[in-house]
Image (cartoon, rainbow, N blue to C red):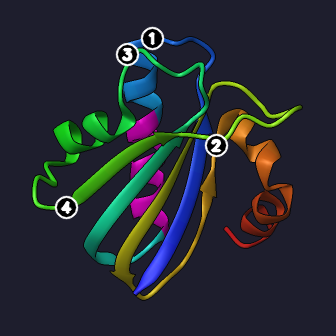
């Protein structure tokens, strides 16, 4: 089993943007990894992301009704970015490539640079 991470950001606390950015993130993770079975998916959001649940967006788009999904609030630390959606996927995969999009790229510049060096 692998644990694959990813994150994205939203500029507005709106259902449509949360949905679009969540789907974009998951599609990118699926494109960069050879995932053949998902056991569970945990989403976290910063406290300002309240208009829609990313887990619901994922379930509606990808139809994983038999996969355990959870969405929780991130701990609120001084200096933390707002508008961040993170994901942790427990799955069966031959690869383990993390994906960080938009402002979330600043969360792990070490992984973003590594990914850009190895397209």
Q: Are marks 3 and 1 in contact (CB under 8 Å)?
A: yes
Q: How far apart are marks 3 and 2 (CA)?
A: 17 Å
For residue 14, the mark is: 1
N-terminal-most mark, 3 or 2: 3
Q: Which of marks 4 and 1 is in front?
A: 4
N-terminal-most mark, 4 or 1: 1
Front-most of residues 70 and 38:
70
Q: How many labels does the image show?
A: 4
Label 4 secondary element: loop
Q: Are marks 4 and 2 in contact (CB under 8 Å)?
A: no
Q: Residue at x 38, y 39 (%)?
A: 23
Q: Which residue is drawn at 63% across and 16% down?
A: 11
Q: Distance between the residues labelled 4 and 1?
A: 25 Å
By secondary structure, the bulk of the magenta-drawn segment is best described as helix
Front-most of residues 73 and 21:
73
N-terminal-most mark, 2 or 1: 1
For residue 44, the mark is: none
Q: Which residue is drawn at 27% across and 72% down?
A: 39
Quarter in which the N terminus is drawn: bottom left
Q: Position of residue 117 (x, y in %)?
A: 80, 69
Reply above or below: 72 against 17. Answer: below
Q: Mark 2 points at which residue?
A: 101
Quarter in which the C terminus is drawn: bottom right
Question: Which stretch appears magenta?
Answer: 22-32
Reply above or below: 42 against 90. Answer: above
For residue 67, the mark is: 4
Magenta segment: does it hold 31? yes
Q: How far apart are marks 3 and 4 (CA)?
A: 23 Å
Q: Do the residues labelled 2 and 1 touch (CB within 8 Å)?
A: no
Q: Residue at x 45, y 72 (%)?
A: 33
Q: Mark 3 points at which residue?
A: 16
């Amino acid at each position: 089993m692998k644990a694959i991470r990813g994150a994205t950001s939203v500029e507005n606390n709106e259902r449509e943007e949360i949905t679009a950015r969540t789907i974009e993130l998951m599609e990118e993770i699926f494109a960069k990894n050879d995932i053949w079975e998902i056991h569970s998916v945990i989403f976290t959001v910063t406290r300002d992301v309240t208009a829609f649940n990313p887990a619901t967006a994922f379930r509606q788009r990808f139809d994983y009704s038999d996969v355990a999904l959870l969405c929780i609030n991130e701990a609120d630390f001084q200096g933390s970015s707002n508008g961040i959606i993170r994901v942790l996927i427990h799955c069966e995969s031959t690869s383990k490539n993390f994906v960080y999009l938009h402002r979330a790229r600043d969360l792990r510049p070490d992984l973003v640079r590594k990914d850009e060096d190895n397209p």
